[in-house]
Amino acid sequence: MPIPSAALLIALAALPPGAAAQQPPRLPTEAQIDRACATGAADTLPNPFRDVPSGHWAYRAVLNLHYCGAARAARERLPMRSS
């Protein structure tokens, strides 16, 4: 079956470089995250989850939890002081 393989290689070679690669989402700054969380607009930040499309019923809640919820609180938690 060398003909289909050759046809595939020719077709792939015709694509511009990086056409098949997806660009990673841009990372928001801490100031952008703080502003979005303060205004209830976490769903305007980049979606870090491939399996939660923007039309999904839980999209806003998932992004709100990711950027403003428990995960953020855990990252910001101060080390416990020793008594």
Image (cartoon, helix red, strand yellow):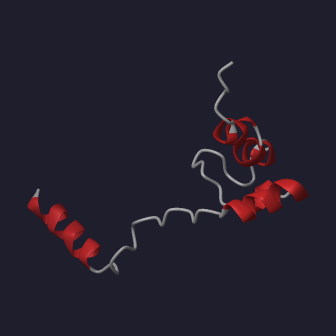
- For residue 27, say whether it is visible: yes
Left or right, 80 with respect to 42, comes to: left
Judge whether 44 appears above or below 17 on screen.
above
Position in image of residue 48 (x %, y %): 60, 52
- For residue 45, say whether it is visible: no
Position in image of residue 68 (x %, y %): 77, 46
Left or right, 73 with respect to 17, comes to: right
- The residue under the point 11% across, 56% down is 1
Quarter occupied by residue 62: top right
Number of numbered discs:
0
Q: Quadrant of the C terminus?
A: top right
Given residues 26 and 78, the one toward you in this image is 78
The extreme left residue here reads: 2
The extreme top residue here reads: 83
Left or right, 9 with respect to 81, comes to: left
Given residues 51 and 49, the one toward you in this image is 49
Given residues 10 and 51, the one toward you in this image is 51
Judge whether 13 appears above or below 27 on screen.
below
Position in image of residue 76 (x %, y %): 68, 42
Left or right, 24 with respect to 32, comes to: left
The extreme front residue here reads: 83
Position in image of residue 82 (x %, y %): 65, 22
- The residue under the point 69% across, 60% down is 30
Given residues 6 and 67, the one toward you in this image is 67
